[in-house]
């Protein structure tokens, strides 16, 4: 595949230069080159290597955007100025600069069905023409990402999934792009999502315990790798062909290995922890809070702090103890309340709950190896998405045309199916 690049003029202020001056910039692969334009000639001024550790940030000053680039060990940032939309495009290119290329395109697949849709695009069930393998291919429109200043999410998801492998986390097999879209090829979980299982017909208690244990193992693995998930909810918990869970949608996930905390307010209101509502720095305990909410929901078919008024809901999250049905057994209640502890320093996690009576009779080594099966096993459907909402599956199965935008160097990724995973450093 042809190496993609992006270039153009920006205003630049380096480490030792206090005034702005016009430069010609080019990103090609993982190198960001800056050229001096003095005297009408293009002369190389600086070459900046882009790695997964490079800090790339954007901000807005009036009508102008600011782009800052800083590598580890550098005292000051390289700062660039230009139109805000252009600055966002540059940021996308630079963030994509470390990824390897692959030859995968939609021409390699037959689109079977639409199985999901979000604000930025949709998810399609696709069949590989050569080997018959089924994949969930997520398509994301570049124009919408830029318009909503959310370019970082697609690269964050791609980067995290390319480095994580776990039996209860969806696998990334490939990623590529066209002029108008990004494509992410994910493991297809044929059993649909947990949302549908909770609402109809409901989940048997032993399955609840198994799902909670599997999710907890996935969260622990993410946390051990410095990653905070931040979006645990039923819609993001898929079920594979054997009925086991697969966490998906890592657009809000973040690696906090270096900082240990973050402060961005994000997530779904029913599942966010008190410290997020209070707008203070938070860390991994917010994921355990969300698991507490989800456990409550799987048991009682509703979330514990639900309120039509968002402000009232936030007050309840911060101040109230959840109500339980009168017939709730004390063990389940205690387990949930330990996860819904308001103080994140006192909140439970898998390491403190692994011996809780809620998991009585369950061996976590067996759970991780999928030796314990849930009662619900998805029916074999010959590749038909029978556990997905008909509002999606009734759509025309086609890759819709989007307005051309541009290509971003190095976004592509390929993991050879059936062989050992080799992850980029």
Image (tube, rainbow, N blue to C red):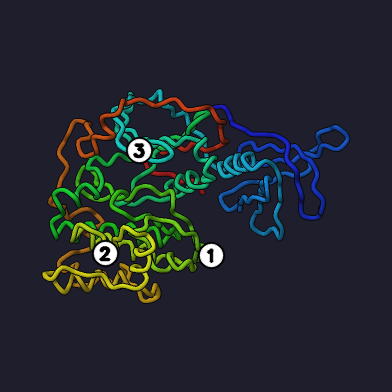
Q: Is residue 132 visible?
A: no
Q: Is residue 141 above or below residue 288?
A: above
Image height of 20 relative to 263, above or below: above
Task: Tell me if residue 70 can be seen.
Answer: yes
The image shows residue 339 at horizontal and vertical percentages of 30, 69
- Which residue was labeled with disc 1? 259
Badge nearest the viewer, 1 or 3: 3
Tell us which disc is closer to us: 3 or 2.
2
C-alpha gap between disc 1 and disc 3 = 33 Å
Residue in view at x 39 percent, y 42 percent: 172
Q: x%, y% of residue 319?
A: 35, 73
Q: State the residue position of label 2.
A: 304
- Residue at which label 3 appears: 117
Which image quadrant for residue 29? Answer: top right
- For image coordinates 45% across by 68% down, the residue present is 278
Tell me the CA gap for discs 1 and 2: 31 Å
Q: In front: 294, or 31?
A: 294
The structure residue drawn at horizontal position 64% and vertical position 34%, both measured from the top left corner, is 6
Q: Is residue 37 left or right of residue 117?
A: right
Mark 3 crowdedness (10 Å alpha carbons): few <14, some 14-19, many ≥20: some
Q: Measured from the top left, where is residue 80 in percent x and y? A: 71, 47
Question: Which tag, 1 or 2, sits closer to the chain's start?
Answer: 1
In this rendering, is residue 234 above or below 364? above
Task: Determine whether 5 is above or below 357 in the image.
Answer: above
Which comes sooner in the sequence, label 1 or label 3? 3
The residue sitting at the front extreme is: 309
């Amino acid at each position: 595949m042809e190496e993609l690049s992006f270039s153009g003029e920006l205003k630049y202020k380096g480490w030792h230069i206090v005034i702005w001056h016009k430069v010609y910039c080019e990103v090609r692969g993982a190198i960001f080159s800056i050229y001096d334009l003095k005297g009408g000639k293009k002369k190389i001024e600086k070459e900046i290597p882009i790695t997964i550790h490079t800090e790339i940030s954007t901000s807005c000053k009036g009508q102008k955007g600011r782009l800052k680039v800083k590598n580890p060990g550098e005292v000051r940032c390289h700062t660039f100025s230009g139109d805000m939309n252009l600055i966002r495009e540059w940021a996308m290119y630079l963030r994509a600069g470390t990824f390897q290329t692959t030859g995968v395109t939609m021409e390699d697949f037959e689109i079977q069905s639409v199985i999901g849709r979000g604000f930025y695009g949709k998810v399609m069930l696709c069949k590989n023409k050569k080997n018959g393998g089924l994949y969930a291919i997520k398509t994301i429109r570049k124009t919408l990402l830029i318009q909503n200043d959310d370019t970082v999410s697609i690269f964050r998801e791609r980067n995290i999934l390319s480095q994580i492998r776990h039996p209860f986390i969806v696998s990334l097999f490939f990623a590529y792009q066209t002029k108008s879209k990004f494509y992410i090829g994910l493991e297809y979980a044929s059993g649909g999502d947990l949302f549908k299982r909770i609402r109809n017909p409901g989940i048997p208690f032993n399955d609840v315990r198994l799902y909670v244990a599997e999710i907890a193992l996935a969260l622990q693995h993410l946390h051990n790798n410095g990653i905070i998930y931040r979006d645990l909810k039923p819609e993001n918990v898929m079920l594979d062909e054997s009925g086991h869970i697969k966490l998906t949608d890592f657009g809000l996930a973040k690696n906090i290995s270096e900082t240990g905390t973050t402060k961005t307010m994000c997530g779904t209101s029913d599942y966010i922890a008190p410290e997020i509502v209070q707008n203070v720095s938070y860390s991994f305990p917010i994921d355990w809070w969300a698991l507490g909410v989800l456990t409550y929901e799987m048991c009682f078919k509703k979330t514990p702090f639900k309120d039509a008024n968002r402000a009232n809901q936030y007050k309840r999250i911060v101040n109230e103890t959840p109500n339980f049905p009168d017939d709730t057994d004390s063990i389940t209640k205690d387990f949930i309340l330990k996860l819904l502890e308001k103080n994140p320093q006192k909140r439970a996690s898998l390491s403190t709950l692994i011996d809780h009576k809620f998991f009585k009779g369950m061996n976590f080594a067996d759970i991780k190896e999928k030796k314990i099966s849930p009662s619900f096993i998805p029916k074999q459907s010959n590749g038909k998405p029978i556990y997905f909402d008909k509002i999606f599956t009734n759509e025309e199965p086609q890759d819709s045309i989007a307005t051309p935008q541009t290509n971003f160097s190095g976004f592509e990724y390929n993991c050879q199916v059936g062989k050992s995973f080799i992850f980029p450093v």
